[in-house]
Image (tube, grey):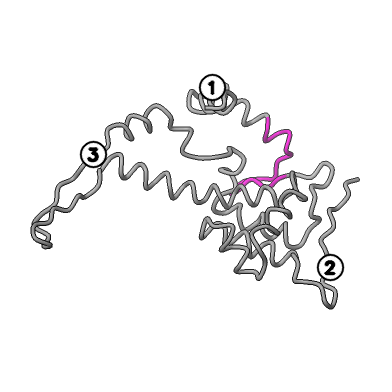
Amino acid sequence: MSTTPKLPSNKPGRPKSWTRAKMALFLRELAASQSVTQAAKSVGLTRQSAYRLRARLKGTPFDLGWEVALEMGFDQLAHAVMDRAVNGEEVPHYYKGELVGTHRRHDNALARWVLENPWRLGRMQVAREYTAPGFEALLERIEWANLDWEEGESLPVPGGPIEERAVGAKREDAFAACSWYAGEARKGRGSGK
């Protein structure tokens, strides 16, 4: 049986604190803004209190929700990096304060880095699986269920059946064993690169 981490209560005279609804709203805003400060402010709390809450709830659905929210931002960043690597960037040319033309500059070092490190454009494999459809299910889980994982609890797989975490881990290991992409990602993550 798991013990549920306690959230501070809102008592008279005590500053506002985290509720499950605020946790879900915070994660939605974090996914949209990629700013812990902005997300905390949107629920009337501070960045420091958000980090304290995450530390207290390490290894829980909220912790995974935080990673998923950041992963959604990394997807946006990855698209921007890929666009810049493929299409370059427009460089304006001015003469006496007036725009007279542009040229496109390509960053070959960036393109080479993307080709050599495709797995480094994201964060956490489990978080990747939850982006999009799984994120809403995870937020609902955070808002309405136990704050900690239940013993033997299954994780929902977006668009698919429910799997036990052990089954999901085996599936990820099997994928890593046969995929150069995932295998390299694990090597890179383990070596501190």
- Magenta segment: does it hold 130? no
Q: Is residue 22 left or right of residue 7?
A: left
Say which label, 1 or 2, has the lower sequence index: 2
Q: Which residue is mark 3?
A: 106
| Residue at disc 1, secondary structure | helix
Res. 178 mark: 1
Residue at disc 2, secondary structure: loop
Between the C-alphas of marks 3 and 1, the distance is: 34 Å
Label 3 amino acid? His
- What residue span does the magenta drawing correspond to? 155-169
In this image, 138 relative to 33: left or right?
right
Mark 3 vs mark 1: give the one in front: 3
* Distance from Cα at disc 3 to Cα at disc 2: 54 Å
The 10 Å Cα crowd at callout 3, few under 14, some 14 to 19, many 20 or more, is: some
Residue 73 at x, y percent in the picture: 49, 51
**What residue is pinned by disc 2?**
9
Residue drawn at (66%, 71%), measured in percent from left and top?
A: 44
Cα separation between marks 1 and 2: 49 Å
Question: Horizontal and vertical percent for residue 20?
Answer: 74, 64
Q: Mark 3 or 2 closer to N-term? A: 2
Residue 11: image tag:
none
Question: On screen, 14 above or below 170?
Answer: below
Residue 142 quadrant: bottom right
